[in-house]
Image: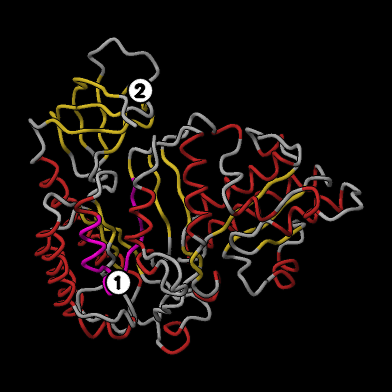
Amino acid sequence: MNVADSRRAAAALERLGYHYAAQPEEADVIILNTCVVRQSAEDKAVGRLQSLKPLKQKNPDLVINLMGCMVGVRSEAPRLHKRFPQVDVFSPPSDFGPLLDYLAQREGQQIEVQQTLDRNALMDGALVLPDYEKGHLVTGYLSIVLGCSHACTYCVIPSRRGRERSRPPEGILKEARSLVEQGVREITLLGQIVDRYGVDCPEYPNLAGLLSQLNEIKGLERLRFLTSHPNYMTDELLDCVASLPKVMPHLELPVQAGDDEVLADMRRGYTAGQYRRLIEKIRNRIPGVSIGTDVIVGFPGETDAQFQNTYDLLQELKLDVAHLARYSPRPGTISATRMPDDVPDEVKWDRFRRLEDLQKGISREIHQRHIGTITEVLFEGQRKGLWWGRTPTNKIVFAEKTMDEHDDLPGKVGKVEINWAGPWSMRGVLVSTTNQG
């Protein structure tokens, strides 16, 4: 989401006459778009803010904009300004309007920014990619649900990004077409709970209906969506993934814990058994599907036995990917307010590493099944002399060139014969390419 928001902000600045600067030392405006979903993310943002102080001291005319969850929808600007006086303007998540206002006033414009730059156009797809990315970006992100109203006890998102709001479908479709016109071949739809799209607006289509409309866009190769919630993964949505050719067979479905008591304390709204049955249903309806999940270790009160239930769940289900996090209390959340952070840090690290080792073995085992097979890869670029891209099931593949290609593979779909597989990626030989769309 922050990547998508940052691209919009960059495109808006270009409309005002600004151009991309490769280094912060060369910039007249610096936007720091922040995440605070974990303590480590907030610490990283604070460190980056402190590193910008010497630039501001050297160049007092430099404009520094703090944006995103660190500011929040109920602006923390007064408190933050005392802590970070080097910051000139504060912008809530997905809203760079305060920066545009500040720049307009700073440049002595006597008319409102709304009259020189249509803000509605910035949010309905008229501006999508900044100039430095047009024609070079293969995959793009498109936010369709802003905020969240689910309120898991550990999550700071509802208080920072506001209540759940589905974007109008016509704006989403316009933005998607605009992305494709600018060279994007794969679009990932984003939402804190993306499969709740349209729940707050009954006149809108649901996610399955929206995917059906997006599937018709000429030139678009692939569609993905994240992140889903187990409670809203409907049969209609699964049938949509199974039947629509451009919707890729990969789902992100966070479980967070494998113990029912921990799940209840998290207010996730399902049991481990219900999650198991959902995974079974998904695999039956979408053969070959890959599934990613999220897990938090060290939630308040988590015992060794409860953690073992989570370990056993992952070992049993053998999901393709597990994004792991150590619990960190976030200010204002229910867990931080009412539940002591009583799992020692060394225990959190031990549980994290045990799950990491388990998942590493599972992922390697899944990937090694592909050795000797040929899979389709949408190429995104080069790394260390190898082409790289992703399979329909979102697995990273590196490919050696055996054909007479030049530097034109990004955006094309190639068939790659896999000859090596590790836990995080696979490698093979490119045997043919197609230019679909």
Image side of residue 56 versus residue 5, left or right: right
Residue farthest along the bottom direction in this orientation: 338
Image side of residue 103 versus residue 9, left or right: right
Q: Quadrant of the C terminus?
A: top left
> What residue is drawn where x is 41% and y is 73%?
199
Task: Give the image quarter of residue 369.
Answer: top left
Give the number of the mark in front: 2 or 1: 1
Count neighbours of disc 1 (C-alpha within 10 A) and say few if under 14, some if 14 to 19, many if 20 or more. few
Pick the front one: 424 or 353? 424
Residue kind at label 2, given as amino acid type: Leu
Image side of residue 362 versus residue 124, left or right: left
> What residue is drawn where x is 40% and y is 86%?
340
Pick the front one: 348 or 107? 107
Residue kind at label 1, given as amino acid type: Tyr
Which of the numbered marks, if any, corresponds to residue 409?
A: 2
Residue 29 vertical position relative to residue 357 in the rendered view, above or below: above
Image side of residue 221 versus residue 393, left or right: right
- Whether 236 is among the magenta residues is yes
